[in-house]
Image: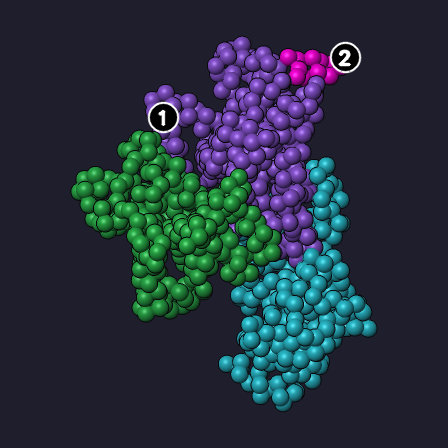
Amino acid sequence: MKNRPVKVILWALFLGVLVFYPSLFGLYFTNIFVIFSIYALYATTFNYLLGYTGLLSFGHAMFFGIGGYGTAIALERIQGLPLLPAIIIGALAAVMLALILCPLLVRVSGTAFAMLTLAFGQLMHVLALKLRWLTGGEDGVGGFPIPPFHIPGVISLDITDPKKFYYFAMVVLALSMWVIWFFTKTPFGSIQTGIRDNPRRVEYLGFKLPHTKAVVFIISGGFAGVAGSIYALFQNLISADDAFGIGNSFAPIIMTVVGGIESFFGPIFGSAILSFIDELTSRYTERVEIVTGLILILVIMFAPKGFSGFLRFMRGKWLSPPNANPALEETK
Amino acid sequence: MNLLEIRGLYHDFSGLQVLFDVNLEVKEGERHAIIGPNGAGKTTLFNVITGSYRPPRGQIIFKGNDITGCKPHQLARLGIGRSFQITSSFSKLTAFQNIRMGILSKKGIRFNLVRNVDKMKEVTAETDEMLRRINLETEREIPAELLSYGKHRSLEVAMALSTEPELVMLDEPTAGMSKEETHYAIELIRRLTEGRTMLIIEHDMDVVFSLADRITVLHLGRVLATGSPQEIRENQQVKDAYLGETED
Amino acid sequence: MESDTVLYISQAMHGLAYGMVLFLVSAGLTLIFGMMGILNIAHASFFMLGAYFCYQVLSMTGNFWVSLIVAPVIVGLLGVLCERYLLRKLHAYGHVGELLLTVGIGMVILGSVKIFWGTESLPVTVPQILKGLVKLGGLEYPIYRLFIIALALVILAIMGLILYKTRLGMIVRGAVSDAEMVNALGINVPAVFMFVFGFGTWLAGVGGVAVAPILTVYPGLSDQVGMDAFVVVVTAGFGSLKGAFIVSIIFGLLSSFGVQFVPKLAPVLMFGFMAIVLALKPAGIFGETE
C-alpha cells in the first residue's frame, strides 16, 4: 500500500478530533454526535445485510428495538446489574430474535425477504405496544438505573455524565463497527459477497446457502441490538414507536442508500449526511420526512452509488490514474 | 470402474416429459461428451445430476453411492464440480476473488470469521496458481463482469475446477465463442482436466470428436447411442436423427 | 332473536366490511406486484391520499358521490405519474431499487399530506341515505357497512370482467403468471405497466374513500390499514388476487371477532396467522413456490 503514511496521518487526525470533540463543540453537538454514531453502527449492520449479502431488510428496527428493550428491562428488573452485562443482554435478545426468525427468512431472498422482515418488524411493534407488563406499552421503559462503566482496578466511569457517556459510547460503537469491518475481510465475508452476486453459484461451489445467510443475519441483528442498547442507555428511555416504528426501519435504509450501498463506509457517511440534514431542516420545518424522502428519490434516480460513489469518482478524477476497478476498494 | 452411473432416469416439467429412461455410465478418467440437438434435454440432465431438480424416477450413482436427490452443495462437497452454459460468475468480484471462492470451499473454509482472507498465504498461492493456468494473471484484479467474453468463459470453467472435483461437468464451455476462441478454450480444457473425469456438453462436432473418449447422443430426451467417436460417427441412427440436420 | 346471534351478525358485518376494504387495498398491491414485480411500499400512502382527497372534494363540493368518483381517479393519475416519470426511469439495483424508490415516494406523500392538511383528524360525513341502520329479516344493519361491501363487490365484478373478458385482462393475467410471455407476444409492455400501476393505485384510492367515514382521516391511516394490507398479501402469496380476496375476508373477520372475544390479543392475531402460514408455506397460501 503506497499511501500508507497518508492513511495513518488521516486516521490519527480523525482520532484526535474524536477525543477532543466534546471540548471543542460543547454538549449540544456532542449529543448529536452520539446519536449519529449510534445510527452509523445501526446502518452499518443493515448494510452488512444489503450491501454485502444482497438481503434487503425492511424490519431492521426489530433488532434495534429488542436490543434497547433488552438492556432497559434488564436494568429495570435486575438490581445492581453492571453495565456491560446489560448491553450483552440487549445484544443477545437481538441474536435470539434473529435465531427464531432464521428458519423462515433464510429460505427467501429479494422482495420476499423484504416483505417478511417488514411484517415481523410490525409484529414486534405491536407486541411492544401490547405486552404492557413487560414493555410499558406506549410509554416504553424509562428512568431505569444506569450503572457506571466499571472494571475493577482499571476504570470506573459514571456515564450519566454526557461527556463521559460520549467516550463510552464511542468505544463500544467503534469497536462494534471495527468487528463488522473485520468480518467483511474474512473468508466468511468473501463467501457473503458471493451470495450477493450469485447465490446459486455459491451453492454449486459447496457452500450451504441457508446456513451462511443465517450467520450473516444473526451477526447483523446482534450488532443492531448493540446500537439499540446504547440508544436506550443514552436516552434512558426506550419506547415502542421510537424503537420499533416503521420509520426506524426506514432510517438505516435511507442512510445506506444516500451514503452508498457498495462501500463499507457508505452507511456511516449516510448517517452523517442525514444527521446534518435533519439538524438543518428541523430548524425550519417539522416536515423532515418530505426532505429525506426527496433526497432518497433523487439519490436512487440520479446517483445510485450514493455519496461514497461520488467520493470515489472525485478521487479517481484527481488523485490517481483512472481506476478501472471500483470493486477493488472493497478489498483493499 | 464407473465414477458416475445413471439408471433409468426420467424428468418432467409440470407434465412436459424431458428425459425418458436415460442410462449413462461415465468411467473413471474418461472424457465423456453429451451431444444432441437443442431441446434434447442435455442441460436438464446436467441439472438433475447436480441437484437442481429431484428426478421423479431413476437413480444417480456416484462412486458407488446413491446421490439421487442430493442438494447442490452436498454434491459439490462429494466431488462434483460444474460450469454453466450461461456464464454464472460473481460479477462484481475480481477474477481472483471468483477463483478463491472455490479454493476456500475445497479447503473446507466456510465459517471462518477470525482471519483476514487476504493474508491466508496458501489460499492466495493456490488461487494465483489457478489464475496462471488459465492465463488470467494480468486480469487478477478485474471484476468478472468486465472481463472479455473469452476470458470470462475461461473463468467459468476454472471456477468449476477450483474445488478440484473428481467429476468435472462442463455445460457448453465454448458457447458463443468464435472459431479461434473455441480452439483456444478446448486446449485449455484439455490441459486443465488432465487426469480428471469429465462430462461435457458440446455443440461443436469437431471439438467433440477431437476431445472426447466416449460420446453419448441424446435425442428428444432419450439416449440414442453411446460409444467411441468412431462408433458414433458411423452410427446410422445418429446420422439420421442428428448429424444430418446440423450439416449446413 | 337471541342477543348473542345479533351480536355475532353485527360483528360479522363489521369484519366483512373491513375485509372488503382490505381487499381493495391489497388487490392493487398484489396486482402491481404480480404484473411488475414491484412491491409498492407507497401503496398505503396512496390509500391514505384517497381518504384525504375524499375529504377535500367533499368539503369543496359537499357531495360524497362526486368525491367517491373523483378522489380515486386523482390518486390513480398520481400513480400513473409516479410510474411514468420515476419507476420506469429507474435502472439501478433492480427490484430492490424500485422498492427503495417507493419508500421515498411514500415519505414524500406523508410529508405533503401533513403540510396540506396538518396532523389533526379530519371528519368525513356520509350522505343521509347511507346513514343509520336498515332492518332486514328482523335484524338491523348499519347501512354504510353494507354499502362498503356492495361497493367492493361491484369493483370485484368490474375487475373480473376486465381480467377475464378483455384482451387487456388476458395480457395482465398472462403477465402475472409469466412475465416472459408478455415480451414474447410483443405487447406494449410500458403502456400495460402504466395502466396496471394506475389501476392498482386507483383501487387503493377507492379503499381510502371507503374507510374515510368510518375511520378518521389522519396521517397515521397509511400505517394502520396499509400494514394490514401488506400482511394480507404476504399471507395470501405474492401476486394472487384470489388469495388476497380470501385472506382479506379472513383477516377482516379475525380482527372484528378478535376485538370482541380476545381484545388484548386482537392486533397480534393477524400476525400470528401470518407466521403460522409462512412457517408451513413460505410463499404464502396461494403463492407459488420457486
The residue at the point 67 percent across, 21 percent down is A83
Q: CA distance from mark 1 to mark 2?
A: 48 Å
The amino acid at mark 2 is Gly
Chain A's colour?
purple
Q: Position of residue B22 (x, y in %)?
A: 67, 78
Q: What colour scheme governs how the chains and residues are painted in the rendered image of this protein?
A: by chain
The amino acid at mark 1 is Glu
- In the image, which residues are magenta? A147-158
Q: Outermost residue toward the bottom?
A: B236
Per the image, the residue denoted by label 2 is A153
Tell us which disc is closer to us: 1 or 2.
1
Q: Earlier in the sequence, mark 1 or mark 2?
A: 2
In the image, the chain rendered in green is: C
Q: Nearer the viewer, residue B86 or B22?
A: B22
A131 left or right of C68? right
Is C215 one of the magenta-colored residues?
no
Q: Chain of mark 2?
A: A
Chain B's colour?
cyan
- The local crowd at label 1, few if under 14, some if 14 to 19, many if 20 or more residues have their Cα within 10 Å, is few
Whether residue B200 is visible here, answered yes or no, is no
B58 left or right of A132? right
Per the image, the residue denoted by label 1 is A286
Identify the secondary structure beneath mark 2: loop
Q: Chain of mark 1?
A: A
